[in-house]
Image (cartoon, rainbow, N blue to C red):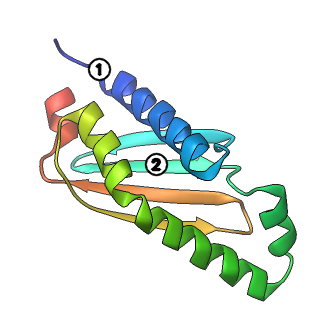
Amino acid sequence: MEVRKSVMESEISKALTQWEKEYFGRGSVNVKTDIVRNMIIVILKGILTPAEQELAKDQQGVLDIKNMRASLIERGNHQIKGIIHQITREVVESFHTDISVHKGERIIVFMLKENLEKKLT
């Protein structure tokens, strides 16, 4: 059965939102996933808790949030890679992430072993 690219992108967005809810205690407000060649690019908006929004009012708080979130993502990286593998059936070779505390956004880029977009089009 052939899966459409847009359906897979939607499934990834939903699965990562659910993972966030279970792992962080709340999910992002908006998630957009794009499959481009051998990359899956995910943009999550509205990720900060009210407490983090308060912390973000000074530079030390921004750094604390970035460090804490980076550490948490790193500890959960096997779960995130597993979610991507389960949906795409592709091997995640690496993933890269960063957070914009000021915008309350996170970007995650999954680098796959194969060109998934080519298989879906």
Which residue is the site of mark 2? Answer: 42
In the image, residue 58 above or below residue 23: below
Q: Where is residue 25 in the image (x, y as percent from the top left)?
A: 66, 47
Residue 54 horizontal side relative to residue 44, left or right: right
Amino acid type for the residue under numbered disc 1: Arg
Q: Position of residue 100 (x, y in %)?
A: 64, 68
Is residue 121 visible in the rendered image? The answer is no
User: Few, some or many C-alpha atoms within 10 Å of disc 2 (few <14, some 14-19, many ≥20)?
Assistant: many
Q: Position of residue 1 (x, y in %)?
A: 16, 11
Amino acid type for the residue under numbered disc 2: Val
Give the quarter of the image for residue 57: bottom right
- Mark 1 falls on what kind of element? loop
- Mark 2 falls on what kind of element? strand
Whole-angstrom CA distance, mark 1 to mark 2, is 17 Å
State the residue in front, 72 or 33: 72
Which residue is the site of mark 1? Answer: 4
Q: Which residue is drawn at 29% across and 32% down?
A: 87
Where is the C terminus found, in terms of image quarters?
top left
Residue 91 horizontal side relative to residue 16, left or right: left
In the image, residue 52 above or below residue 87: below
Which residue is most to the top?
1
User: Few, some or many C-alpha atoms within 10 Å of disc 1 (few <14, some 14-19, many ≥20)?
Assistant: few
Residue 51 horizontal side relative to residue 45, left or right: right
State how many labels appear.
2
Q: Where is residue 46 in the image (x, y as percent from the top left)?
A: 71, 50
Of mark 1 and mark 2, the one earlier in the sequence is 1
Which residue is most to the bottom?
60
Q: Which residue is drawn at 84% across and 57% down?
A: 50
Disc marking residue 104: none
